[in-house]
Image (cartoon, rainbow, N blue to C red):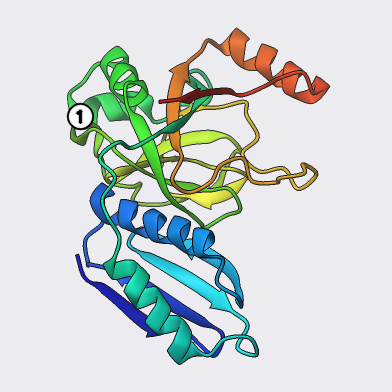
């Protein structure tokens, strides 16, 4: 897979892999980021992975674009696919339906699936976090079952509540804060994806995985109370 390195303003460059959005391409992006960290290249200040590219910010007083682009090109061509992918899976509780999943009944009509089938399919997948964006802590997830793919709402909602879990097109995601949005809502999580008062405000990192765990409405409020008391801890699996 070829790598294309391009300038992005006077203090950043973009390393791009292909034109498609899929897991193989995204693995290359994260593999390059890991390799750059290991090389500890002087002058690099930040890296931002996306679906199929890596934005690399640098201090032009410490390293030139020509030198950095050459280094990145060489590292990108030397990447090897790691067949033994190690997953960090974060289990996210989700209350499907109730007052959170206002579009769940409409999803039944659009997909021809029952409510229980939709829940089982949605919670039966480990979703890779391809990238973060749009809002602080908003995750773009890959791996949605094709049977759950539905179009976005014709008219977006003015406000979607924090923690809402929705589906739009071929993606699913979680709204980290109150926001307008056009995705169809199927549930909600009590977990705060973004909290500016935390040491690490954003809960996830690109390259990690999310697994939704169905919970009841009572479980939702119990977990919420634990979070407010500071006694709740995420369930994380290493595979």
Residue name at image x 62 percent, y 45 percent: 178
Please indicate, yes or no, whether residue 88 appears anywhere in the rendered image. Answer: yes
Please indicate, yes or no, whether residue 97 appears anywhere in the rendered image. Answer: no
**Along the line of sight, which residue is nearer the eye, 42 or 26?**
42
What is the x, y in percent for residue 10? Answer: 54, 90
Residue name at image x 17 percent, y 24 percent: 112
What is the x, y in percent for residue 194? Answer: 66, 43
**Along the line of sight, which residue is nearer the eye, 13 or 191?**
13
**Of helix, strand and loop, which one carries label 1?**
helix
**Along the line of sight, which residue is nearer the eye, 203 or 80?**
80
Picture quarter containing residue 203?
Answer: top right
What is the x, y in percent for residue 28? Answer: 32, 57
Classify the position of the N terminus by image quarter. Answer: bottom left
Picture quarter containing residue 71?
Answer: bottom left
Residue identifier under label 1? 111
Residue name at image x 19 percent, y 31 percent: 147
């Amino acid at each position: 897979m070829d790598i294309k390195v391009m300038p992005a303003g006077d203090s950043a460059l973009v390393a791009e892999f292909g034109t498609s959005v899929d897991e193989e391409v995204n693995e290359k992006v994260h593999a390059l980021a890991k390799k750059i960290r290991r090389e500890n290249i002087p002058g690099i200040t930040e890296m931002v992975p996306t679906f199929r590219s890596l934005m690399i910010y640098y201090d032009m007083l410490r390293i030139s674009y020509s030198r950095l682009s050459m280094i990145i090109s060489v590292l990108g061509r030397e990447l090897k696919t790691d067949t033994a992918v190690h997953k960090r899976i974060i289990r996210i509780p989700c209350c499907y339906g109730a007052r959170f999943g206002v579009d769940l009944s409409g999803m039944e009509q659009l997909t021809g699936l029952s409510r229980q089938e939709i829940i089982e399919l949605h919670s039966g997948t480990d979703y890779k976090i391809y990238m973060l964006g749009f809002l602080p802590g908003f995750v773009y997830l890959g791996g949605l079952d094709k049977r759950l793919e539905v179009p976005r709402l014709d008219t977006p909602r003015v406000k979607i509540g924090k923690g809402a879990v929705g589906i739009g097109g071929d993606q699913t995601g979680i709204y980290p804060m109150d926001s307008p949005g056009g995705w169809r809502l199927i549930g909600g999580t009590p977990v705060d994806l973004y909290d500016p008062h935390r040491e690490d405000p954003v809960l996830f990192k690109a390259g990690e995985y999310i697994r939704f765990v169905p919970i009841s409405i009572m479980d939702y409020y119990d977990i919420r109370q634990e979070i407010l008391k500071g006694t709740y801890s995420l369930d994380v699996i290493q595979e």
